[in-house]
Amino acid sequence: MDSDVAPPSPLTPVTEEWERALCVVAHPDDLEFGAAAAIARWTGQGKRVVYCMVTSGEAGIDGLRPDACRPLREAEQVESARIVGVDVVDFLGRPDGIVEYGVDLRRAIAGVVRRHRPEIVVTNNFRDTWGGASLNQADHVAVGRATLDAVRDAGNRWVFPEQLQDRVEPWGGVREVWAAGSPLAAHGVDTTATFDAGVASLEAHAAYIEGLGWVDWDAREFLEAASRGAGQRLGTTFATAFEVFSMGWGD
Ligand SMILES: [Zn+2]
């Protein structure tokens, strides 16, 4: 019965008092399915945002062999980043579809955190589902979980100490990790003014979207539907929702 369904709880705005963010996700396109409009907002405020792709999404197009797919998807990601004001995209080259959570993945991500020294780290939803029965994808779960742990690893000089050379120092300055699109999201950011940039950023994945073979699928319609619900909870037209993990001790 409808009367048994609790109204969606309001979202609290995320802090925007920071200057550098690092986004770590499994695949090209992961940020564009919801978070890119938020990133456009932040780069428009003069913040510096860099991307790290754990894989190159080379197993993402059924009709294209990975060796042919990889450069195509990397190029599409670089362009979609450029559209929202991001000019650094690191590719870690892990195999698409079979990313494993573990020390090796934490090491790779900790190295990226130490090089870029962000205050905020953005990743994708790594809960088991997107809410309801919609199952999350294995790479997303592994990468999100490893990112959360790697942020803490990056601040400890005795963890992965071999990375501490050539002026690379431990970095314990990440205040929060934000998981975009989590079903447990309680925070959000207004993306109304930068919504179009988010759409253009998703449309830059043209070969990938074409390869999915979704008939009559439209990037704008998809993002409107996805962003409107979060907007209602934040009190704006459109929004991106995040589950926020504080990296401080005892707060
Ligand atoms: Zn993905």
Image (cartoon, grey):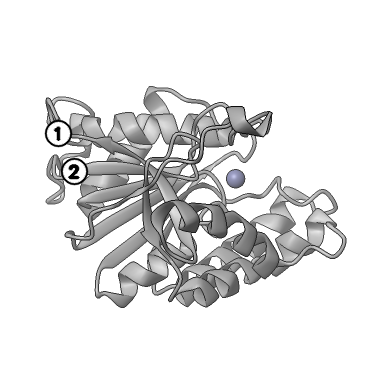
Q: Nearer the viewer, residue 117 or 194?
A: 194
User: Which residue lies at the image location 36% right of the left edge and 31% below the top edge?
Assistant: 106
User: Type of residue at label 2?
Assistant: Arg
Q: Is residue 148 visible?
A: yes
Measured as percent of width and height from the top left, residue 223 is found at: 61, 62
Q: Quadrant of residue 173?
A: top left
Q: Nearer the viewer, residue 84 or 235?
A: 235
SS for tag 1?
loop
Q: Nearer the viewer, residue 51 or 37?
A: 37
Image quadrant holding the C terminus, namely top left
- Local packing at callout 1 (Cα closer than 10 Å; few below 14, some 14-19, many 20+) is few
Q: Quadrant of residue 131?
A: top right
Q: Is residue 247 above or below residue 14?
A: above
- Local packing at callout 2 (Cα closer than 10 Å; few below 14, some 14-19, many 20+) is some
User: Type of residue at label 1?
Assistant: Gly
Measured as percent of width and height from the top left, residue 32 is found at: 55, 60
Specify the farthest residue to the front. 3
Q: Which residue is mark 1?
A: 248
Are the residues tagged 1 and 2 within 8 Å (C-beta)? Answer: yes
User: Which residue lies at the image location 59% right of the left edge and 55% below the top edge?
Assistant: 226
Q: Which residue is mark 2?
A: 175
Measured in 3D between alpha carbons, the distance from the residue under mark 1 to the one under mark 2, in whole angstroms, is 6 Å
Quadrant of ligand 1 in image? top right
Q: Is residue 85 above or below residue 73?
A: below
SS for tag 2?
loop
